[in-house]
Amino acid sequence: MPLLVRRTAAALSLLLVAGAAGSAPMAQAADGSTGPAAATVAGIPGARGIGDPAFPSDGNGGYDVAHYDVHDSYRLRSGAISGSTTLTATATEDLSSFDLDLVLVPDAVSLDGTPVRFAKSGRHELVITPAAAIARGTSFTVKVRYHGVPRRLGWGAEKPFFAAPDEALATNEPHIAPWWFPVNDHPRDKATYDITVAVARGHQVLSNGTLVGRHTSGAWTSWHWRMTRPMASYLAYFTAGRFRIERGTTYGLPWTVAVSRAYDRAAQDQQLRLLRTSPGIVHWLESQVGDYPFDSTGGVVSGLFTGFALENQSRPTYPFLGVGHEAHSVVVHELAHQWFGDLVSVEHWRDIWLNEGFATWFEWRYDETHGRASAWRRLRSEYAGHPASDAFWRLRIGSPGPDHLFDQPVYDRGGMALEALRHRMGTTAFLSLLRTWVQQHSDGNATVEQFEALAEQVSGQDLGGFFHAWLHTGARPARTAANGLR
Ligand SMILES: [Zn+2]
């Protein structure tokens, strides 16, 4: 995500969901409780959060999801979703109950095909209680039917779903998935996805990965997209509306780009020209960090005003970007995230520097390899531009806190830290570090501490003081060789 416009937290409006009794737990149709008494384990309730201190309710404990099969129908005019999602998971504990994250209203839940007890606990947690405990190591499927109007649904200060009467966009960070499907909502539980979204005939749906098929029945057209590589839940998306879509294959990589028809023809042409640079940028990034991990690329320019772009896996989403160097840099940034953020994801949200610092550094690296200022020069000018008294230096970007994940220093001080590290290690060793990092954590998660350790290993240097100065203090690093500044 690049900061194009500073986001303001949407005011939380009082919300009453039809059919849901406020925040009171709503016990629903109990069934299966009279089923065969096959309980061989007692089980305990799975934790309501996966264990990220910054966001205690994010994700859940006790299971690991392998695959989501999402089927949503989206009504553009009313903004209503109804759908059913089947997820395949494995218990990692003996579970007497477990949670999914879902802000929508649940209508029915079944476990391995049998209806089960479920209740909403608060606005975010769907608690599922099987008739008999699920033993650790058991694979199971959960199917949830649900409905709601996601643009109206808030949780805390967040209302992350973007919608207008003619277009919708389920894109945000760190939270969006529970607004359109039930999910273990944390980057630590990656899964593959089939995403099928039906909209009124004559409209289009874009999502992650490859378009498997399109099926029109009556007034509806279903668009089925597939992501075959593990993906963090916040990177899953769909957008529905009227789009100009182009497809092709460049350097052997299929791509799909799309621009909202909300813009006039000339603006559409201009944004399509920009998006068509994506395969070339991916090809350049491969020369820096190794093979592109996904089976397609591209991008979508939304007709909605979001104020930010997001690195949705394989196919980022953008607001209107205009033209010129800054617009192009946003595309470089989001495509660099395909390795740094998507293929290698944060272990905790506090590790966000691994995403934003790296994507920012690649903007600078792209520039210096394409006839513009060097990243080293960029580092020095940013350093000079922020005197020691500047609030810019206050944020400890190695763990910025949940309210500051996307503050400017995470990006700029983050990119500076990497360029300083490169200056200290040398370019060859630094690029080798990045490649090794990606190889070691592909399809997984990683921490800032792990990156620090690998940098020491690859460089053979003690970098404790360096990382302390750049990532873990609220002060401007001194201009020393040890800090990569001389
Ligand atoms: Zn970013």
Image: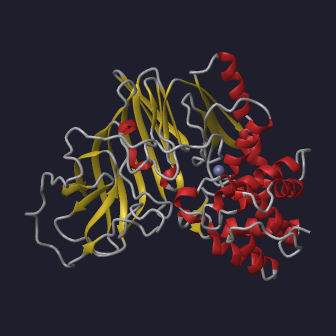
Decide: is 69 above or below 83: below
Drawn side of residue 4 relative to residue 160, left or right: right
What residue is drawn where x is 25% and y is 75%? 44
Towards the viewer: 383 or 70: 383
Q: Position of residue 438 (x, y in %)?
A: 68, 65
Please state the total of marks drawn on the protein image. 0
Quadrant in which the C terminus appears: bottom right
Does 38 appear above or below 147?
below
317 displayed left or right of 275: left
Q: Residue at x 47, y 40 (%)?
A: 170
Depth order, front residue of 5/370: 5
- Image spot of residue 15 (x, y percent): 30, 41
- View extreme (top): residue: 265
Residue extending furthest toward the front:
389
Camera sees residue 290 = no
* In the displayed structure image, the side of residue 70 where residue 29 appears, left or right: left
Identified at 64% across, 43% down, the residue is 297
Which residue shows up at 73% across the image and 68% down it? 475
Residue 458 visible? The answer is yes
- Side (left or right) of 34 relative to 424: left
Where's residue 109, x and y in %? 23, 52
Residue 345, horizontal then vertical, whole percent: 58, 61
Rendered image coloring scheme: secondary structure
Figure quadrant of residue 470: bottom right
262 or 141: nearer the eye? 262
